Image (cartoon, grey):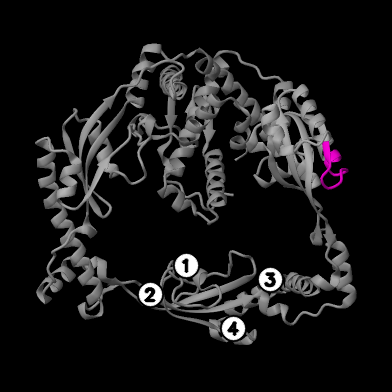
Amino acid sequence: MLEFMRKFATTWFIKVFLAILIFSFAAWGIGDVFRTRASDTAAVSVAGTRISMAVFQQEFAREVDRISNLTGQRVTQDQARAMGVDRMVLARLARGALFDAAANDLGLLVSDAQVLQDMVQTPEFKNKAGEFDRAIFMDTLNRNGYSEDRYVASVRRDIAREQVLSPIATGAAAPKGLVERMYAHTAESRTVSGVRISHDAITGVPAPSRADLEAFHKDRSADFMSPETRDVTAAVLRAEDLAAGVSVSDAELQAAYAEREAEFVTHEKRKLLQILVPDEAAAKKARTLVDGGAEFVDMITEVGANPAMFDIGLFTRDAAESLSPEIAQAVFAAPKGGYVGPLQSPLGWHVLQVDDIEPGNVRPLDDVRVQLTHTIKLDRALTQLFEQSNHLDDLLGGGMTIEEAAGELGVAPTILKGVRADGTPSTAPYAAELAKAAFTMAQGQPSLMTETEDGKAFFVARVDTVTLPALRPLDDVIQAVTDAWSRAKRAETAAELAKTVQARLDAGEPAAAVAQSIGQQAIQTQPFTRDAKGLEQNALPASMLKTIFTLQPGQTASAEGTGAHVVVRLAQVLEATATPAAPGYTAVEQKTLGDLRADLLDQMTAALEAAHGLSINPSALTQDGDDVQ
């Protein structure tokens, strides 16, 4: 995780490489990577350098923890292996070892000063003042399982790897001819005309017979299944319930109010209007004119200010500091209606008017008494809640059922009958979280003690009954089946009509005339590119775009979209002129350059593997690391 954080301070290409280093595995080819078996005690061996199984397991466990933190759900090592995380980590270690070998070959040395500079520039190690903070540095390392020496070594190693890669970042260039061809392909645009045949606009579909509905109900049975449901019994311990029994004295309330007074402060705000111009002379002219009685808003046209920057809204003093400290001080010293400036900021020269003032205030204790009392009670209840959850665990561990343990604690069991995976239709507190847990459990087995997502409750749940999905009887879903049958018939009719429309467009009939003759909508697009730029949202089915860019003018295509069949005829092909000033040219050039650099990286990796040898121990992927500490 720490290596990942550091990379945000490196060059963009090095970021790309490290992303490849972290996530790439398939590009190596499984057969190539595992063709040679390393010794049983090494996970990876390169040029005499051995990365032990223990190091691999530590990196794998750290990666699993990182994924768990990112997703907010605990991911087991078995689940991570199923996702290929072990292969990803092994490939990352292998690639890193190859580039370490290259750095050694080149005799690259990284000074202590370089390491220190990298560390102090890492944003995650800085305090609010933007300065490196050793306490934050050590805390971050400890939370991520790193010693200082180990982290320093990893920084030194990564800087050396970046030096190995820098020739690829600086030496590659995208050939002009290739960029121009790529741009011509990417920026080419086309227009089409055609007909949208809306399924809902199809008329004349007959009413279905009972036999039609029975057959449709059977053929589309998956559409008419009842959902899986479960009956759940749970003991739910809520801080809200415990808070009712907590008392708060007036002295305690007074002390809490004094401690949290900042929470009840509303800061003064000022509504600001401004004239923002790039030069001081124009700003001085505006100030002179308004001091002479001119309307402030008229200064927009008088001095050529940006009208979009005139009314900049309400500012607290802290927010005004974002313009500049001088501006903040001036506008908060001015009266309502007063002018300040000209004052300079990185944006230019400002003349400002204080259009309105919203005074600040402090809410008195009496106004927040109920709210603050409840907050104090809830804070104390959370401490009791943790103790109560441990007691519940002990009771269940001693052989009590959920119902018995809940009764011992004076809590009524929560009963959910026939709940779906999302907790519906129950309205019980935390029903969604109880159901989510229940749908991962076997019938009859209680869950582990689980903390709710808001941190204000714990629960233990048991699945009493599992009702599997089943086909609902036709008579129970007769209206839904009838509606679905009718929609399907309209879609079939639209598909047949689309064939007729396509034949008429192939014959050269105007699309508008064809659409009018069948009572459907005509289509006429503006120019659009292969990635649908210039095309209105949902104007064409996504599956049709690729086909359109294979057509010659006058050729047609047909596809089914959401609720409609669409038939189009290619009207125009608008070729793009590739010049450096053309819109999007720079993006294509950078994309092409990035692809070339990635190719060079692959070639460099293959050459290093051939020169130094690489062996990866496939048994690393079969080891059970759940018990590795």
Mark 4 or mark 1, which is nearer the start of the sequence?
Answer: 4
107 relative position to 27: left or right: right
**Residue lying at 89% horizontally and 68% vertically, measured from the top left:** 255
At numbered mark 4, what does the secondary structure look like: helix, strand or loop? helix
Residue type beneath disc 4 = Ala
How packed is label 4: few (under 14 Cα within 10 Å), some, or many (20 or more)? Answer: many
Residue type beneath disc 3 = Phe
Question: Do the numbered discs 2 and 3 sit on residues whose CB atoms are within 8 Å?
Answer: no
At numbered mark 1, what does the secondary structure look like: helix, strand or loop? helix
Mark 1 or mark 3, which is nearer the start of the sequence?
Answer: 3
The residue pinned by badge 4 equals 405
In the image shown, does 16 or 460 lie closer to the viewer? Answer: 16
Mark 3 or mark 4, which is nearer the start of the sequence?
Answer: 3
- Which mark, by number, is residue 386? 3
Comparing marks 3 and 1, which lies closer to the viewer?
1
Magenta residues? 329-340
61 relative position to 299: left or right: left
**Residue lying at 43% horizontally and 29% vertically, measured from the top left:** 615
402 relative position to 526: left or right: right
**Residue lying at 72% horizontally and 33% vertically, measured from the top left:** 299
Comparing marks 4 and 3, which lies closer to the viewer?
3
* Magenta stretch encompasses residue 607: no
Residue type beneath disc 1 = Lys
